[in-house]
Structures are given as structure tokens and as C-alpha cells.
Amino acid sequence: MNDGFNVVEARGISKKFGDFQALSDVSFTIEPASIVGLIGPNGAGKTTTLKAILGLTDFDGEMSVLGRDPRKGRHKVMERVCFIADVGILPRWLRVSDALDYIEGVHSNFNRAKAEAMLADTKISSQHKVRQLSKGMVTQLHLALIMAIEVDLLVLDEPTLGLDILYRKSFYEKLLNEYFDHSTSIVISTHQVEEIESLLTHLLFINQGRIMLDCAMDELDQIYAEVLVSPEQLAAARALMPIHTRDMLGQKAMIFEKVPRAELTGLGELHTPSVADLFVARMQG
Amino acid sequence: MNQLMVLIRREFWENRSTFLVLPMVVTGFFLSILLLVAVVSTSDTATVRIDVDRDEEVQFFNLVTGHFYKYALQQLDGRSMEKREMYMNAAMQSLSLPLLFSLWFVIFFYLLGSLYHDRRDRSILFWKSLPVSDAMTVLSKLLAALIVVPLVYLAGVILLQLCALTFVSLSASGTDISVVDTVWRPAAVFSTWSGYLGLLLFHALWALPFFGWLLFVSAWAKSAPLAWAVGIPLGIKIIEVIFTDQSLAGDWMLDHIIPISFLDHHHPVAGNASSYWFSLQMLSALVVGGAFIYLAIWLRGKADEI
């Protein structure tokens, strides 16, 4: 459905809230059939970035979502894009059966039977109102509604925030097993890196409104390397300009960027850094 | 069109208590009074007593008239057709007032909250994540407030009036009074009801600046929409009176909130409005109201959680 162009093209996005620069000159691309992790600490600009994609906030810069400017035709963009925010954006008075009726009425790509089948696996009844559901059940409901809509892009803003581990696990399992079919792209924002690390095809680190890292997961090992440097090699390792150094059981773990692995092999034990370690390196560096 | 229907249904889900329950309660309350009067006043002199202190019975009111509906019937029977029409019109309108009065407040608070509450409880992020345009959203709220909800309240009015007329008609049994001539023809139910519809449509357009203003404040205010909605027009009025010694803007605003000048008990309800349909003032109302609605749609497009 993407006709070859990228799902999202963001060029020079900036956004100010009063004196606070929420985003400054943010550019990135989301390719078809990718799962992008937008990772950053609280207040880094994750939600603002996602809202910009969805046309839910105004901003400066160029944004194209499925070939459209979301500021001009949000409702057109939303025919091919779905959104789940952290818990609590479903109105408390909404009845489950009414939610199904509503989305069926306004969305041409909604498969009601699919949503009902997913809800049948949960403890949610069609007569429940959102206010009667627990946090985890509200997320289950929202996921069931959204997963029954056929779209090109799914935007998830801290979707599992405040949920217990069982709900978090099943959320990502459902998402990956039942939803992701390699024709849909997904953007997930989170500050809990470990949880989604294995899902991702792309990484976007963001801090203080700036993109700190933009990398495909399968290029990670070509660009970044972590070396457990033995004490006698310390000087040689420092000369190669590690982007981050931390103490680890009396040794130094150093992360290098764009240093050929051949130059690093002699320094100590070599491997690809975990996303969490890379994140820390990028945020502190 | 289908989408618009779903959006209007959505408004009824959210506002069930004021759109459906309240008119049913008000209608039910007055229906039971009508019924109570019919039951209580079947004896020739009925006294309604309430027991205040257990030992002391206080007479609440005394229906010396005997059979209330029969009394009303006899009063009508003895009058000219013109008088009958006048009394019937007054009675019909009195029955409609409690519902229409509630309706005004329901619409007022509904419109004032319609583009505000979902920004407060963040559900705007859900509504805006669906393929519904901002214009359609605002339009659905306006149509619910100005057409659909008034029709619900009007149904209550019609039910009340029908019941009252039926009770009066029933009391004619055993007499040779013609119910058609004394009750139904002077009541002119169909022209009264179509008059309500006309007045409803007229008021929707005539008071469009007021309704549009409420929508605008609802979409714009970051807190206390009621204070803004009331405070700003009041401020304009005060400033105008102090500095110009006139009240042109103030009168214009008041005239387009509740057109009291049209309420005339001696004529069919819609009669007075007809001359205003194609007036300059109506045109000004449409322009100002339309501008507010346009601004509300524009603000809704920019709107985020607050």
C-alpha cells in the first residue's frame, strides 16, 4: 500500500512550548515494514515526535506521513495510521460494544469480527464500560480495537507504561505474533529499552529534543562495538576515542563508534553492545 | 452521512443522562401530576392533606373546584372560540415550559463542555486518532445540540400535552359537550407542534452566535470555560455601558441568547418569529455564528490534551 515511498519522512521538525524547546531540528525516516524504537528518557521529546507524526500537534518543519502532511489532513492520514498512547486515553464513559460500533461506523478498514474474537480471549465483556476496567484491561481493549484495523503504520506511545509484567509480555507477544505481518510499520516509544529490544528493526535515540542515534539494528554491529579492555591495553584503547567507558568487574567496558573491528580485536573481548548500554553511552556521551 | 449518524450517537452515549434520562424524568414527573390530579379530583371536593407532625394534619390545598378536568371543560364550553384558543394556547405552553427550560440549560452546558472535556481527560487523543475530520466532529455536536436533542425534549412536550388533552376529553363522557369543538380544535395540536418545529429551527439559526460562542470557548479555553463564556460578554456589556452610555452590543447579544420578545402567550408560538426570518439581524446572526463555528473547527484542529 506504500507505493514505494517511505511511511514517514520528517525533515527539520522543531517544536516549542513557550520557552521550552521540545524538538529541535529532528529528522528521521520510517521505512515500510520496519519496527522502530523511539527511545529516550522522560521529557526527551518522544510523545511530541509521535504527536507530530499523527497531526495531533502543530510544529515547524516538513513532515510527510504516507505522502500527506498530517497537519493538513489528519483525518485522511488516520485512515492508514493507528495510535495507542499510554493508558487512559479511552474515555471512561465508553461502553465496549459502543466502542466497536463507533469504530465500525467511522473506519472503513475495521474488522469487527477480529476485534470481537480478540476480546473473547480476555475478561472484557461487551457491556463493560472503560471505567470498570483495570489499567491492563483498558490496554487490552485498545489493542484489540486497533489490531482489527488494517493500516500501514501503527504508533505506540509508551503503550505498556504502568502495566504489570504479565500484561506487558502479552502485549508485545500479541503485537508481534498476531499483528506484525511485514506490511505494516510500527513505531514504539519507550524509556524501557530492554523490553522491546528484540522486536526492533530500527533504533532512534532521542534526548532533549534531538536525535542522538539513528541506526538499523542489523547495522549496529558494523558501527558499534564494545570491548572489555584489559588494564594493560587501556592507553591504546583510549587512543581510539571510545564514546563511552564504564567500570565492569575491575575492567573497563568501552564502546566504540565506527572503529573497524580489526583494530579492536587486540584490545580485549569484543562484542556488540546491548541497546541499553548503547543508550546509556549515547545519553551520557 | 453514515459517519455523521455515528458521531451523533456517540454524543448520546456520552450525554445519556441529560439527553435522555432528564427529559424522561421531567416528562414522567409532570405526567404523574396530571394523573394524580385525575385520580384525586374524581370526588366532588378533594382535599390534599399532608401529615407534618403526625398529630397535626395540615391542609395543603383544597380542590374546591371538584373534578378538575371537568371544571376546565366547562369553563371552555362556555367561551367563544377565540377565548378557547387563547386559554388552550396558554395551557399548552405552560405544559411545555419545564421541558423547554431544562432543554436550554442542557444545551448550554453540553456545548460549553463538548470540545473541552475530552481535552481534559485526554480522550481527545483517541478521538483524533480516528479518521474523523474536525469539521465533522464540531458539526455533529452542533446538530445534536440544535436539532436532535430538542426533538427528544419536544417529544416529551407533545406527550404531556396529549395526556392533558385526553384527560379533559375523558371528563366529557356523560355530557353533551363536543370534545372536538371545545378541546381539540382550539388546541390546534398540529399547528402548535409544527409551530414548535418552526420555532426550533428559527431559534437554532437566530441564536447561532450564542451556540457558536459556546463551541468556540469550549474549543479554546484551557480552564474554566463557564467563566470565559459568561465573563467576556458581560465584560463587553459593562465596558459598553460605561464608555458609550449605550447598550447596542449588549442588547444584540441578549437578543440572540433568549429572544424573549418572541414569547407571546396570546399567539401561536411561531407566529411572532416569521417576520424575522429574512431580516438583517438574522443575517448578522448567521455571519457571527458561522464565524465562531469556523474558529471552533480551526481550534479543534490545533487542539491537544490540556
Image (spheres, coloured by chain):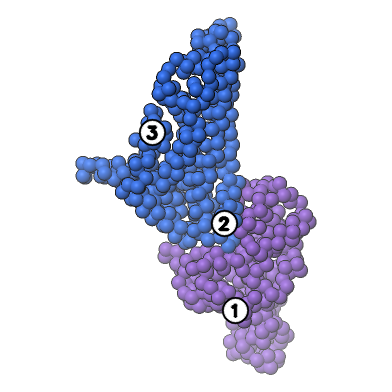
Q: Which mark is residue B1?
A: 2
> Chain A's shade in the image?
purple
| Relative image position of residue A87 (x, y in whole percent) | 63, 57
Asked which quadrant contains residue A255, the reply is: bottom right
Q: Tell me how far mark 3 sits from mark 1, CA to CA.
A: 62 Å
Q: Which-is-in-front pick, marks 3 and 1?
A: 3
Give B54 or B24, whichever is nearer the viewer.
B24
Residue at point 44%, 27% (across, down) = B89
Name the element at disc 1. loop
Give B201 or B237, whichever is nearer the viewer.
B201
Is A180 located above or below residue A103 in the figure?
Answer: below
Task: Give the labeled residue for mark 1.
Answer: A6
Residue at point 58%, 62% (across, down) = B131
| Relative image position of residue B187 (x, y in whole percent) | 48, 27
Mark 2 surroundings within 10 Å by alpha-carbon count, few (fewer than 14), some (14 through 19), many (20 or more)? few
Report the amino acid beneath label 1.
Answer: Asn
Q: In which quarter of the image is the N terminus of chain B?
A: bottom right
Q: Which residue lies furthest to the top in this view?
A: B55
Residue B55 seen: yes
Parent chain of label 3: B
Is B120 located above or below residue B238 in the figure?
Answer: below
Mark 3 surroundings within 10 Å by alpha-carbon count, few (fewer than 14), some (14 through 19), many (20 or more)? some
